[in-house]
Image: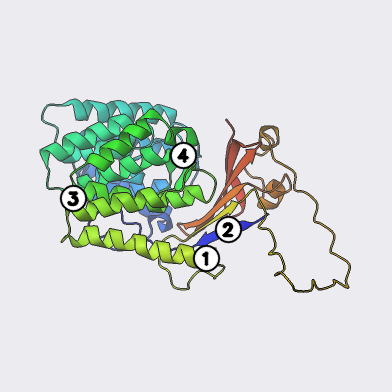
Amino acid sequence: MKTLVIASIALAAPLGMGAQAPARKNPAQLSAAEVEKLETTLKANPRDLAARGTLLEYYFVARIDPAVAVPARRRHILWVIENAPDENIAYGPVMTIDAAGHFLADPQGFRLASDAWRAQSAKPDAKAMTLANASYFFKTNDKPYTISLLRRALAMDNGNKEIAARLGDEYALVILGVTMINRSDYPVQSDPALAESALAEQSRAELLAATNPYTVAKAGYQILWQGSILYFSQGLPFDPEPLAKTVLDRAVSLAPADRDVAALRAEYDKFRLERQRILNGAAPRAGNSAPPRAQVARKDATQTPAAAPAAGTATPINTTAPAPAPPAQPEVDAADLRTVTAGMTREEVLKLGAPSGRITMEEDSHLIEVYQYSAKGQRVGTVRLRDGVVFSVQVP
């Protein structure tokens, strides 16, 4: 079994076309007294967005009891949607609520927040950034609606690079069939059928006809970056590299003098060179700076055959006994995955058999592993581990 590994390829993973926010203290390190002080501050001044933003981060990353974190997140998120929908605080991972799939899932909160965002977006005086912020909430659970929101926002503010880039993000998610991302935009769940759906084909056509260079450039970059992670973990039915190059080349043709567009196109060349080095058997270069680092393994179905001896040469005689073949790995099926539960260790999971694809990444100082399983050519499920312990199991 041949294994191809691509690790730490130097992609900067920009969230948009602009500069990233400066680093600050990790909210997960707040003490209980500090959290209580911030909550008290908000009772006196609900519009203290700095305090509310810190609390949103805390309840999202602190790994506290979900019985505390879930209702607190719901309360703060609903307040932001109702009172500050066009502010920067209203955009990003901390403002999302998933109906299922992990320990912070909140079906009631998802419904309430979804209804609140739809109500805000339907207002005739809704601002462009309100629509753009709403789009982030729906980006994986209602992609057609997300695209419509971003189109409306861009029509209202056509020169906004950030909104244009977000539309590119969404086109990429549709084309790749991504159904869940983490806070660093890594695709942790996908549906290959969605990547071959009519919506994906429509999005591909719209992207190739788009005239906003920032939409096109960001989509091309994400197709390369997110798509490669999925492809090399058997989560994508096609190699995204050719499409990414086509899209990025088109972006450059639309804005040949734009530095942001050129920078994203340059990432393709870096990626291509590093991928070829690794395919040729070289170790990944040290010092690559993609944060957080990712390692993706893909198992090919065929073994690379040994080269035949050249004509006219003697075949060397092997004077040692051949090593015994390793035992065949068991094929993990859906029934096996249903025995996996939260709290099981990595060793216990691997006893069932090797995953067909594996993604490893660092997130908030934790090691996250995503094991994807296939049997008889069909995907059967996904197991996610944090620091070597299962926290999520998904079996169709």
List the single residue furthest toward the front: 312
The Cα–Cα distance between marks 1 and 4, rounded to whole angstroms, is 37 Å
Read off the residue under disc 2.
4
Amino acid type, callout 4: Leu
Residue 161 appears left or right of 218: left
How packed is label 4: few (under 14 Cα within 10 Å), some, or many (20 or more)?
A: many
How packed is label 2: few (under 14 Cα within 10 Å), some, or many (20 or more)?
A: some
Q: Position of residue 351 (x, y in %)?
A: 74, 48
The Cα–Cα distance between marks 3 and 4, rounded to whole angstroms, is 32 Å
The Cα–Cα distance between marks 1 and 2, rounded to whole angstroms, is 8 Å
Tell me which numbered mark, 2 or 3, is placed earlier along the sequence: 2
The Cα–Cα distance between marks 2 and 4, rounded to whole angstroms, is 34 Å
Residue 327 makes an appearance in the image:
yes
Q: Position of residue 336 (x, y in %)?
A: 70, 36
Helix, strand or loop status at disc 2: strand
Pointer 1 and pointer 2: residues touching (CB < 8 Å)?
Answer: yes
Q: Position of residue 133 (x, y in %)?
A: 24, 40
Task: Answer above or below: position of 58 versus 23.
Answer: above
Read off the residue under disc 3.
161
Helix, strand or loop status at disc 1: helix
Read off the residue under disc 4.
104
The Cα–Cα distance between marks 2 and 3, rounded to whole angstroms, is 36 Å
Tell me which numbered mark, 3 or 4, is placed earlier along the sequence: 4
- Single out the mark in the foreground, 3 or 4: 3
Q: How many marks?
A: 4
Pointer 3 and pointer 4: residues touching (CB < 8 Å)?
Answer: no
Pointer 2 and pointer 3: residues touching (CB < 8 Å)?
Answer: no
